[in-house]
Image (cartoon, helix red, strand yellow):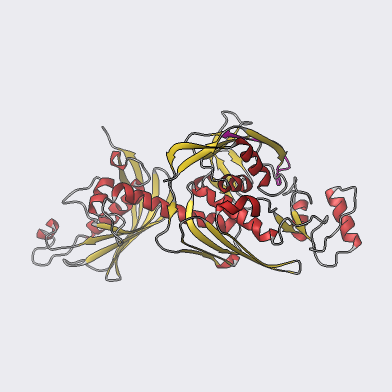
Amino acid sequence: MEYKHTIGGEASYTGIGLHSGEISTIRFKPAGSEEGIVFIRTDLPNRPEIPADIDHVVDISRGTTIGLGNATVGTIEHVLSAIKGLRIDNVRIEIDGPEAPVADGSPIVFLNLLRQCGSVQQDSERVFFELDAPISFSAPEDNVDIVIVPSNELKITFMIDYKHPYLGTQYTWLPSLDYYEKEFAGARTFCFINEILYLKDKGLIKGGSLENALVIAEPNMGEEELKHLQDVFGYHKPVTVSDEGILNSHPLRYHNEFVRHKVADLLGDIALLGIPIKGHILAARSGHKTNVELVKKLRQIQKKNELKKIYQKGKSDDVVFDINAIMRIIPHRYPFLLVDKITEFVPGESLVGIKNVTINEPFFQGHFPGHPIMPGVLIIEGMAQAGGIMLLNQYDNPENFVAYFASIDNVKFRKPVLPGDTLRYELKVISLKRSLAKMHGETFVNGEKVAEGDFLAMITEKEK
């Protein structure tokens, strides 16, 4: 058993934002045992609070940005990395600007501040994301591959592979968080000179300099190019290039500092899951975009597991929700409950439900005597009920709500359904909001499509 921790005091740091160029002060404060990591924009009316989780990520184009309404906080990955590297679960972070300070381009400044505050054990038990089997994620367009395998603690293996004379292939691994502070927290962010010139010209790194990032030069840069860089950054002294190809000759803190920074970034991004991970992450060439996509996938699995704990009392490897769980989620009952079990479920995206059609179904008495065929409208109703499970699971108390279908369009029936058939409902979400959803449903028997349609549903609270 492990317990959650917060910090024991307060600490602050003032610095410039990498992209916005705005000066802001960030202040760390203790938090309650169930608060998680929360950013508070103290410079905005009503001091909006933004949870640092995957559901509040609004931009990953240049670092990780979270938001709620019109309030956002950008470039938070180094702050989150330091927090998770020290195994802190709950902390309130006040900030009076739109972006966390870049500091020296690494998490070490924030880690040292948190160290000063100390760590306090809380009375709430830690919950971990644990794996029963490996999980893989690939993004071929970005040449990224990530695999997570079961482990009794968090481990990270990372490889980068750049086709650049000064930065080729680097590899490192984090065997446990015990090694983070000494071996990874000081690794600084990096970029290539062509990237920084482009971003500087577009005004996208107003706070960027050769002091808060490792800028990698091109081979054989001439005096004229270096003089141009001196003018771009407004330096009084000439810009130099080290033997490792780093502008302004910053010595490396680690022989493979570049890949170690990627590990620090990844740790900050997986903090968005909201709970610590027990697993070994093996990542090749991943960045913020694919890190966040990975966390979204883990969040879906986490939601499914949480729902199974709530509704699915017995354990079954091939069933997400059995009939008893289904009846806890939707209000339908015999003779109008037309879903027997849910076998696949990706929260907010897709669902597969099963209905075994037997001769004992009451509608066969009249549809049709001597020639039993399942009414097509009931196939549509079965898909709608499966879709209702998708929608109602968003609520902590689904028994107090009901899903009404506002429209059903593009319905087609392709084959009759007979006693003895097994219906496989496949529902995919087209759009999903808190109380309104559009889904496309298809029903199959032995792999052949028998019906399909588009559903628009609204969630309303039951009348009391």
Please say whether residue 423 is visible from this viewpoint: yes
Number of callouts: 0
In the image, residue 214 sits, relative to residue 75, either above or below, namely below
Please say whether residue 407 is visible from this viewpoint: no
User: On the picture, is 389 further left or further right than 168?
Assistant: left
Image quadrant holding the C terminus, namely: top left
| Position in image of residue 390 (x %, y %) | 35, 51
Give residue 42's quadrant in the image. top right
In the image, residue 206 sits, relative to residue 259, either above or below, namely above
Q: Residue at x 65, y 58 (%)?
A: 260
| Position in image of residue 455 (x %, y %) | 35, 53
Give residue 300's quadrant in the image. bottom left
Q: Nearer the viewer, residue 171 or 181?
A: 181
| Position in image of residue 211 (x %, y %) | 78, 49
Q: Residue at x 28, y 37 (%)?
A: 462
Q: Nearer the viewer, residue 15 or 197?
A: 15
User: On the picture, is 366 further left or further right than 127?
Assistant: left
Q: Is residue 19 rendered magenta in the image?
A: yes
User: On the picture, is 162 further left or further right than 126?
Assistant: right
Q: Residue at x 75, y 45 (%)?
A: 207
Q: Nearer the viewer, residue 90 or 139?
A: 90
Q: Residue at x 44, y 64 (%)?
A: 134
| Position in image of residue 180 (x %, y %) | 60, 52
Q: Nearer the viewer, residue 60 or 13?
A: 13
Residues rendered magenta in the picture? 17-29
